[in-house]
Image (spheres, rainbow, N blue to C red):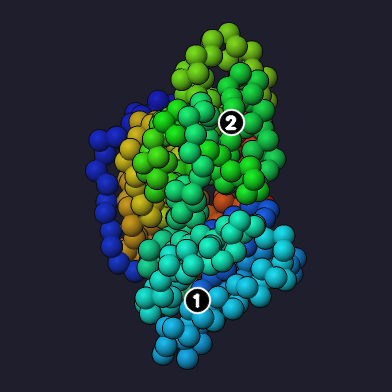
Amino acid sequence: MSLDSPTMGCTESPVLRERGQKAVFCGLTGIVWLHRKMQDAFFLVVGSRTCAHLLQAAAGVMIFAEPRFGTAVLEEQDLAGLADANAELDREVARLLERRPDIRQLFLVGSCPSEVIKLDLERAAERLNTRHAPHVRVYSYSGSGLDTTFTQGEDACLAAMVPTLAASDEEELIVVGALPDVVEDQCASLLSQLGVGPVRMLPARRKDAAPTVGPNTRFILAQPFLGDTAAALERRGAKRIAAPFPFGEEGTTAWLKAVADIYGVSAEKFEEVTAAPRARAKKALAAHKGTLEGKSLFLFPDSQLEIPLARFLARECGMVPTEVGTPFLHRAIMAPELEMLPSTAQLSEGQDLEAQLDRHEAINPDITVCGLGLANPLEAKGHTTKWAIELVFTPIHFYEQAGDLAGLFSRPLRRRALLAGGTTA
Ligand code: SF4
């Protein structure tokens, strides 16, 4: 098959469904970026020292900046008597809120240990909510490794907020998914130039700016891993705008176009608003194409960003996806992406690590996208890797970030070529 014209469309492709040993983060890691987005929120994990260590490791240097998250560590006596655990949780929360009066939203985050001992955090949140309302709103969700993989922690968090959003009949558009502030501003500016509005974000930066929801609400996902949040919004009467995700020039244009069509924006207006940033994105992408074109790509399951990213890298950078793994495949949400993905890509859902490593070895791709636990061992075996976690911390959405997004993949290839003393082209 010619690389110039790969057959597009994975909608009908068979998906390899795997269960077995996994190498993924649990949903607690979502706290690391969510606490930065929601500036008046605090995330209190109810878990063990393992959970506290995980957060410490994932947050890196951020733990020295008085972050708005922490772990209420379950001790042996808590495991013996649940009544004590509840009383102690209430005491800890009261102390925390007294010390940090700036906190307006408190999330009790469930973990594997809290789930195993059946500590009912939903009830605890209700109880604490009545005690600390109206100044503080208390929510609960699970970020445990038993229920959630990595970015699903954000989905669980946002889905927990939806039932508490104020009801309204206003015609409003909600952009769903935590984006870095600079990206959120670009998104809001493009939509306002198109004449679309009012636009709200979920999550909002502060409690007071939370969106309202009702039968006249439309929403569009900015992240692909928000299936439960989408379902929760639909239960409140809101309607989802289906679109590919705003990665790369093509993805961003298709995402904006989906909104523009619903809001009746004229083709002339759309062209006028998008022409300049599209040209900038294309130019920025061209700088990386020489390194990426024709290179094969293997993605281990990690964040659910894998399918949109493979689509972007295939169509806009000329890469050749081999296996595209995802921890969870939401068919309806991913439909526009699957239509655009080259049909040569093997899709896999879930993980059986050893079997996947064997397939990876047989394919021997030019670049492998994987978690931190796999990256160094694979590098040591001579593979070039890209850490998937960077893709959730780095601004990668919309036009102005298209070049940076391609750069995240071209850099490891360039570095390897430099170390080998060769060229990348
Ligand atoms: S929630 Fe579970 S998987 Fe995550 S750190 Fe705690 S014990 Fe480990």
Q: Which mark is residue 47?
A: 1
**Residue 240 found in image quarter:** top left
Amino acid type, residue under disc 1 in the picture:
Gly
Q: Can residue 194 be seen?
A: yes
When the figure is inspected, residue 224 is found, relative to residue 24, above or below; the finding is above
Q: Is residue 253 left or right of residue 422?
A: left
> Where in the figure is residue 330, as x and y percent of width and height?
34, 45
- Label 1: few (<14), some or many (≥20) within 10 Å? many
The residue beneath circle 2 is: 199
Q: Earlier in the sequence, mark 1 or mark 2?
A: 1
**Which-is-in-front pick, marks 1 and 2?**
2
> Where in the figure is residue 52, as x and y percent of width and height?
57, 75
> Where in the figure is residue 398, as x and y percent of width and height?
60, 34
When the figure is inspected, residue 342 is found, relative to residue 271, above or below; the finding is below
- Write the residue at 40% across / 71% down: 120
Q: Is residue 265 left or right of residue 421?
A: left
Amino acid type, residue under disc 2 in the picture:
Val
- Write the residue at 49% across / 49% down: 164
Establish whether ligand 1 lies closer than 8 Å to the Cβ of label 1.
yes
- Label 2: few (<14), some or many (≥20) within 10 Å? some
When the figure is inspected, residue 82 is found, relative to residue 410, above or below; the finding is below
Q: Can residue 255 be seen?
A: no
- Tell which of 105 and 363 is nearer to you: 105
Q: What distance separates the C-alpha of mark 1 from that of mark 2? A: 37 Å
- Write the residue at 39% across / 35% down: 237
